[in-house]
Image: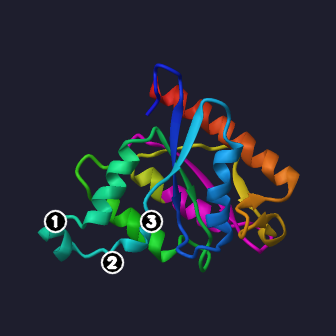
Amino acid sequence: MTDTANGTTTLGVLVGSLRRESLNAALARALPALAPGGTRIVPLPSIGDFPLYDADVQARGFPAPVSRMAEAMRAVEGVVIVSPEYNYSIPGGLKNAIDWISRLPDQPFAGKPIAIQSASPGAIGGARMQYHLRQTMVFLDALVLNRPEVMIGNAHVRIDPAGDVITDATTRDFVAKQLAAFVAFVRKNSS
């Protein structure tokens, strides 16, 4: 939440990859260092603990990891989703998490500002995943930042997963510009 005493905006980062050394997880961990002043970026819980979505399980109650994620999402003003592209689309783990979260009462995506980032060793940097994710977010009534888009192609030469840093200065600057635009978007939609 925005701390009205000092004007700090808190953003949560949802990572669509389960692998610790993934380029996208490293990108997510690099974001706090690129955030504009007055912004705090915190990791959201892992999607790795979510069971596969099953309406029979839901009928017995929402699993604790789903409830924890929802609480964490509600506690931040905006969410940055950082995810790879699998088979031209959204990774199964991320889609599963979205399916669970979307079924909660007081659905956390509704009205929530969302920014999307992706990184890939390939040339187009996860663009197809982003377009599918945008479609999903429209259905969930999320407020998705349109521009600038962050799709980092050839990410294996631009991001160091061992050091959690973006090593390419142009990429680092572009990601910082998106974060600044997203903070302005969040603040505009919070007032």
Q: Amino acid at mark 3?
A: Ser
Q: Amino acid at mark 1?
A: Gly
Q: How is the image coloured?
A: rainbow
- The range drawn in magenta is 110-135
Q: From the viewer's perspective, is residue 124 above or below residue 79?
A: below
Q: Amino acid at mark 2?
A: Leu
Residue nearest the observer in this picture, 9 or 112: 9
Query: Residue 163: x and y, percent?
Result: 73, 64
Q: Are marks 3 and 2 in contact (CB under 8 Å)?
A: no
Instruction: Give the left or right position of residue 48, taking residue 41 as reference.
Output: left
Instruction: Give the left or right position of residue 123, taking residue 109 as reference.
Output: right
- Who's the residue at 40% across and 40% down the image? 111
The extreme left residue here reads: 60
Q: In terms of secondary structure, where does tag 2 sit? A: loop
Query: Residue 133: x and y, percent?
Result: 53, 61
Q: CA distance from mark 2 to mark 1?
A: 14 Å
Q: CA distance from mark 3 to mark 2?
A: 14 Å
Label annotation for residue 61: 1
Instruction: Give the left or right position of residue 106, taking residue 95 as reference.
Output: left
- Who's the residue at 46% across and 55% down the image? 44
Q: Is residue 102 visible?
A: no
- Who's the residue at 71% across and 69% down the image? 161
Q: From the viewer's perspective, is residue 50 above or below residue 164?
A: below
Label annotation for residue 46: 3
Q: CA distance from mark 3 to mark 1?
A: 20 Å
Q: Are marks 2 and 1 in contact (CB under 8 Å)?
A: no
Image quarter hosting the N terminus:
top left
